[in-house]
Structures are given as C-alpha cells and as structure tokens.
Image (spheres, helix red, strand yellow):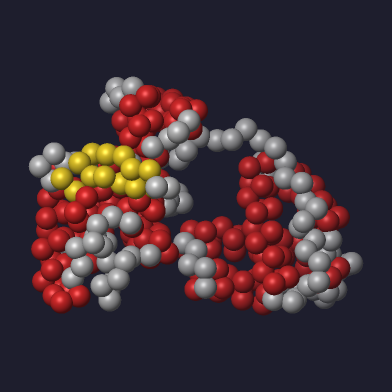
Amino acid sequence: MGALNLGTEIKNFLYYCEFAEGKSLNTIKSLRIDLVKFNDYILKSKDLNELKDINTFTFREFFIELQKENVGKRSINRKISSFRSFFKYLRENNKIKKDPTLLIISPSYEKGVPEVLSLKEINMLRDGIEMKNYHQIRDRLILELLYSSGITSQELLGLGEDVFDLEEREVVVTSFKKSRVVYFSERTKEYFKRYVNAKKDKLKQKYKKEILFVNASGGRLSDRSLRRLIDRYALKVGITKEISPHSFRHTFAVHMLEHGMRISQLQKLLGHSNIESTKIYIDALEKKRRSSLIDISNV
C-alpha cells in the first residue's frame, strides 16, 4: 500500500468549500464521494508516496478502472470537475507546484435535460416550512415566487417591494440591465402580504422597502444563504435529488408547457434571448411524461 493518503487534504478542502465558498450540502456530499473514491484508489497504489507523484497518467488509469465498473461518461465528467476543484485548491494553497488536472480531457456525452421537481415534491417543501416566524414566512414566499414565476435566484435576490403589482399579480425583474414582466400566483400574493407585514414588525427602524428578502440583520439575503435554505428544506423533507434555486425555474418551465403554453411565450417569460435555450424544456417535458408512463405501468 502506498504511503500517500489524501484524507486530511480532502477534509480541509471540504471545510473550505462549505464555509468559505458556501457550497450546498448536496454539492459537498458529491465532492466527498468523488474524492474519497479517488483516495481509495490512491491508497492501493504502490507508486505514489507524495502529492507531486500524482500526474495525468494517474487519472487515466483511475478512469480505466471506473469504466471497468461501468461508470458512465456523465459520472466521470462530474468526478473530473471535483478533481479540478480539489487540485486547484491544493495549488492555491501551495500544496503542489503543478496542477495535474490541467491536461485531463473530459469525455464527451449528450447533454441531459433539466431535472424538474414533481408537484408532490413541491408540496413536500411547502409542508416542510413550519411558518412559526417571519423568516419562515419569507422562505415560503421565496418558494412560491420561484415556482410560480420562473425567475432566477439573481433576479429574486435583487427584488424590492415596489416592483410588485399585487392586483395584477405582476412583478418587474431586471437581469443584465434588461427588464421584463413576469407573473405570480394568488398564493404568492397572500404570502407577500404576510411577509411584508411580519418584516415591518420585526425590523422596525431597520425595515427597508427597497430590499424584499432580508437576512437576520436586515440586509439583503445572499445567494449563499438562499441555496442553504433550499438545501436545508430538501434534506428535511427527504428529497434526495440535488436541487437548487434554478430547479424551480426548470420546474416552472416544464409545468407551463405541460399546461399548453407556447414555446415563444415561455421564452419571453424566462427572458431567453435565444429560443434554442427554451427548447430544452420540450425534452424535459417528454422525459417527465415517459417517467409518468413507467410509474403507471408498475402500479
């Protein structure tokens, strides 16, 4: 067995990813799985004694072993991404002089369709928010707004209260200096009212109308915090697939097509400049329908 063990470096890297970069718990879990798998391979090697001994050939041999285990190209690509992040971290912290991942060529594969949430999973997330304080009312509003409008996390976090028209259920969102009007549900409207009233009572003098979603100190909620709260609720209710704020945008798009919306109209709502970007949701809808047929056939 070789003397090289990456265990300590992996532990430090994962700590850095979680607390310095704010990566989601599911991302941390994926990184840990990939790096521990590689470390197990390293521990069995007789030729590796130091970090500098790891080179492009090491990865090539490792990927050959994975292929023998029938690991697909998509999974290998994910592992390559994990290794690149890890060795970049080692290089930036002067643990290595050369990054051995720079010459790795990722295998090509057909890009998959977006993963969407089912209505059952949406309702699980809704039920997982207890609504006992104004932060939880905020979280419920975030869920409802992301799901019913299809906006991005950046657009959501940049919102103020004055861009909402509650009577028409419209909101003006801005991205890359371009604005568009999107729509939201009646349920979102009700939680908006509850949240704003609760926010005023809680923050008092710190209350700011120009910032809709706030943190504990009354400042604007960060992208890191948004991802963490969604990750936390997903883990709480037992959703095992990796989800993010963007998952709600994917889900919104597929559900709109499912209910008969034209692709050109969906393109406008999503703010896509190229309709090809919107057409991926046609494939996602077909995947959802095929999955539903399989589920029925197994009943």
Q: Residue at x 69, y 72 (%)?
A: 92
Q: Residue at x 61, y 76 (%)?
A: 12
Picture quarter with the N terminus: bottom right
Of 194 and 286, nearer the camera is 194
Question: Residue 285 sits in which quadrant?
Answer: top left
Task: Inspect this view and state whether residue 261 appears.
Answer: yes
Image-based side of 235 in relation to 139, left or right: right
Question: Residue 15 sits in which quadrant?
Answer: bottom right
Image-based side of 86 in relation to 287, left or right: right
165 up-or-down from 52: above or below: above
Of 252 and 180, nearer the camera is 180
**Which residue appears farthest toward the right when viewing the image?**
47
Measuring from the top left, give residue 177's x and y in whole percent: 39, 47
Question: Residue 38 sits in which quadrant?
Answer: bottom right
Task: Inspect this view and state whether residue 151 appears.
Answer: no
Q: Residue at x 66, y 41 (%)?
A: 72
Picture quarter with the C terminus: top left
**Which residue appears farthest toward the front when viewing the image?**
177
Measuring from the top left, give residue 3's x and y in whole percent: 82, 75
Measuring from the top left, give residue 280's x and y in whole percent: 48, 30
Q: Residue at x 53, y 63 (%)?
A: 28
Measuring from the top left, give residue 23's x and y in whole percent: 50, 63
Of 163 and 237, nearer the camera is 163
Image-based side of 152 in relation to 109, left or right: left
Numbered-mark total: 0
